[in-house]
Structure formats: C-alpha cells, structure tokens
Amino acid sequence: MAQDSVVVLGGSGFVGSHVVARLSALGRRVIVPTRRRESAKHLILLPTVDVVEADVHDAAVLDRLVRGAGAVVNLVGILDPVGRETFERVHVELARKLVAACTTAGVPRLLHMSALGAAADAPSRYQRSKAEAEAIVTASGMAWTVFRPSVIFGPGDRFLNTFARLSATLPVIALAGAGARFQPIHVADVAHCFAHALTTDLTVGARYDLCGPKAYTLRELVSYAGAVTGNERPILALGPALSRLQAAVLEILPGRLMSRDNLLSMQVDNVCACAFPTVFGIEPAALEAIAPLYLAPAARRTIFDVLRVRSGR
C-alpha cells in the first residue's frame, strides 16, 4: 500500500461518501472497507478508490487494512444502539482497536470523528461514549486530529429529510425537545475539513468544533423543513414528561425516529462557542442556501426524474 493512501472507516456512509470523494478529487488513493461491497457501489467508479469487504471490528483484519497506509480516517458511529452494535462496541472498542492497529503498523496520522457535546459527564450515553473514544485517540501518541461537528445536513441526511417527511405525512407535529438548540453544518464543509487536515501539520493535535453560521431551535428547524417543502404544519411542543414518553415509544417503533438517549443528548445545546476554524480557509455554508436545493418540491421532482431515467421508466 502506498504511503499516500488513506483508509477511511465508515467511508460508505453519508459523511464518509463526501470525504472519500473529496480525497479522491485531490488524487489520494483511498481504501474503503465495508461489510457489504454493494453498499459502497457509488464509490467504486471513483478513480483512486478501492472498496474492500472487511469487518473493521476484527482486530486481525484491521491490522491488515491499515498496514502501509499514510493516514486513517475514522467516521464510524451510530446514533442509537441496535443489537450487538452498541455505543461501547462501535465508538469505544473500535477506537481502541484502531489505535492499536495503527501503532503496530506505524501509521503516522489519524483523523477521528467525534461529536459536539462529547464529554465524560454528558447526560447521554452517546455523548459519553464519544468522549471515551476521543480520550483513546488523544492519548495514542499518534499525529491525531479530532472533529466535533454539530448536526450535519445535506442531500440524503437523516436530519432535515426526516422533518420533511413528518411534515408531509402528519397534520400536527408533536415535538419533544422543541427548545433544544443546534448549529447545523453542511456535509461538504465537513468533508473539506477532513481532507484539508491531511495537507497541513497545523491541525495535528487539535480538536475542532464544526458549526454552520447560525443556531436554531429544533422547533425552528422542523418549521423550516415544512415551509421549504410546502408542508408547514402546526407544532405542538411537548413538556418534559410527555417528551420522555414519546421518546420511549418511538425508540421501539420501526424507523426509530427518537430514543430516550437522543432526548438526553438534547439537554446540552449543540452549538459552537467559537468561530469556524480559520485553518480550513472556508466560510461554512448557510442552511438556507443549501437545503432548498434538495428539499424544495422542484428539487425533489428533479431527483425523481433522474432516478426514473436511470431505471428506464
């Protein structure tokens, strides 16, 4: 494996696909391990990308994957545990195995995706597990960089698109945690930061909080998604007790729109206390400049037409 190669764990996901495409555009050779190659078929045609079937939770497999790489990017994460995919396994144990593999193989550089609000004393298990993983990475002795984004939006997100679907199907939206605050950042800006971090030593040993230019309450974001899609609905803000009840019910239903752990995460405002890091040389995109491009009815019709043509219908 060439020393300029980058192994991207979680490279076939929402954020990972953008990071991999950005690295490929810069001419970097990228290795994307995935449990099912079919799930990463959108990356296979990128000229410098190799998609390989592999279980990154297997320490021996991980050792082979990173051997000879110049850098590793860890984007693997979950918002809710499902079966054996627990916060401990996915966030903490994988970080520990990855650091051990990189150390054994002599990989010099590690970029790690954490989350805004990660802290050892945070209210949710999600946030605490992210903090545990950060601690493993920062104690590794490697040339590390940690990114802590707020919620990430863009085509295919599970954030604004979820609100848009709810607005299209429900006459009234009963909303838990309506006053929780977020500062959404565009997925392309996150991908830019990851790719740029590999081009400069200025980012070594640094943690970066990543946010867009404006903070919103959850209620404002749900209302905005409805307005953009032409399906604005009345919003009923639930109190603490009803919010907990709603989260408890939703976490056992198909689709898992919310969990009690998600609700606990929203007790801490998901906003940045500082300006966007100047080292990355960009101004983050505004939500209002991007969201209509994929949420507005005309945009959705365009996407449907493209898919229909591709399917031969």
Image (cartoon, helix red, strand yellow):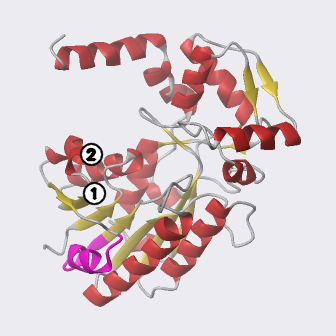
230 left or right of 243? left
Q: Is residue 68 magenta?
A: yes
User: Which residue sits at x=41%, y=43%?
Assistant: 188
Residue 312 visible to the viewer: yes
Where residue 228 appears, x then y in whole percent? Answer: 57, 17
Q: Amino acid at mark 1?
A: Arg
Q: CA distance from mark 1 to mark 2?
A: 8 Å
206 left or right of 108? right
**Which disc is residue 39 wearing?**
2
Q: What is the magenta range?
A: 57-71
Q: Amino acid at mark 2?
A: Ser
Residue 28 visible to the viewer: no
Q: Nearer the viewer, residue 199 or 302?
A: 302
Vertical arrangement, residue 128 with respect to residue 25, above or below: below
Q: Which residue is mark 1?
A: 35
Q: Quadrant of the C terminus?
A: top left
User: Which residue sits at x=70%, y=60%?
Assistant: 124
Q: Nearer the viewer, residue 187 or 285?
A: 187
